[in-house]
Image (cartoon, grey):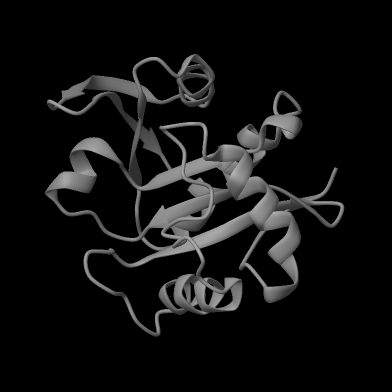
């Protein structure tokens, strides 16, 4: 299975919107980052690709990359890589977030996407990535711990409790 990380394209609309609507029931995972109900998909693609390509970064976003996880021409998930972190993101969100759509879980895609994401972060000069996950997300906990992450501490706010990890990146 050849997995790749790539920018969204307008041609992904049907598949991406199906994934987005599928994930709306999950309060912890936003598949299409910042998609606005009723927004033309092409406008969303232009906005997220503009951030990914460094053309613009609207407030309150941080510089980063939104990439689909694709295998055999099928979008199976997405990653969001943050090139830098502010205090809030460093505490509760970290350098990366990812979603593998339910029909594609438990096939190794998350592990491969995590490894590819860490390599991208390393190329950006980030040697230690902050990775967080919801304290009840057993799959994400197993994934990051299986990748060698060091549990640092719990990050607690009135709205959430996250496990905060540090993970060495590599080339």
Of all residues shown, which one is farthest toward the bottom?
55
Measured from the top left, where is residue 116 in percent x and y? 59, 48
Q: Residue at x 52, y 27 (%)?
A: 147
Residue situated in front as seen by the camera: 142 or 11: 11
Residue situated in front as seen by the camera: 86 or 149: 86
Residue 24's place in the image compared with 46, above or below, is: above
Determine whether, in the image, residue 16 is placed left or right of residue 126. Answer: right
Q: Which residue is drawn at 68% across and 30% down?
A: 102
Residue 146's place in the image compared with 169, above or below, is: above
Q: In which quarter of the image is the N terminus?
A: top right
Determine whether, in the image, residue 112 is placed left or right of residue 107. Answer: left
Q: Where, by quadrant of the figure, is residue 12 drawn?
A: bottom right
User: Is residue 171 something one can see in this rendering?
Assistant: no
Number of marks: 0
Measured from the top left, where is residue 69 in percent x and y? 66, 51
Q: Residue at x 74, y 33 (%)?
A: 104
Measured from the top left, where is residue 105 in percent x and y? 70, 28
Residue situated in front as seen by the camera: 29 or 142: 29
Q: Which residue is drawn at 34% across and 22% down?
A: 150
User: Is residue 76 something one can see in this rendering?
Assistant: yes
Q: Where, by quadrant of the figure, is residue 14 drawn?
A: bottom right
Residue 20's place in the image compared with 49, above or below, is: above
Determine whether, in the image, residue 48 is placed left or right of residue 58. Answer: right
Measured from the top left, where is residue 170 in percent x and y? 49, 46
Of all residues shown, which one is farthest toward the front?
38
């Amino acid at each position: 299975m050849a997995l790749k990380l790539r920018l969204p394209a307008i041609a992904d609309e049907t598949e991406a919107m199906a994934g987005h609507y599928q994930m709306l029931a999950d309060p912890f995972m936003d598949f299409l980052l910042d998609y606005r109900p009723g927004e033309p998909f092409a406008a969303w693609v232009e906005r997220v690709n503009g951030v990914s390509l460094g053309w613009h970064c609207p407030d309150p976003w941080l510089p980063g990359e939104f990439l689909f996880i694709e295998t055999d021409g099928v979008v199976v998930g997405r990653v969001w890589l943050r090139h830098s972190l502010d205090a809030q993101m460093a505490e509760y969100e970290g350098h990366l977030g990812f979603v593998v759509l339910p029909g594609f879980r438990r096939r190794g895609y998350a592990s491969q996407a995590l490894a590819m994401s860490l390599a991208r972060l390393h190329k950006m000069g980030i040697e230690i990535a902050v990775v967080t996950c919801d304290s009840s997300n057993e799959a994400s906990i197993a994934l990051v711990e299986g990748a060698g992450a060091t549990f640092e501490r719990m990050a607690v706010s009135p709205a959430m409790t996250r496990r905060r990890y540090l993970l060495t990146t590599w080339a």
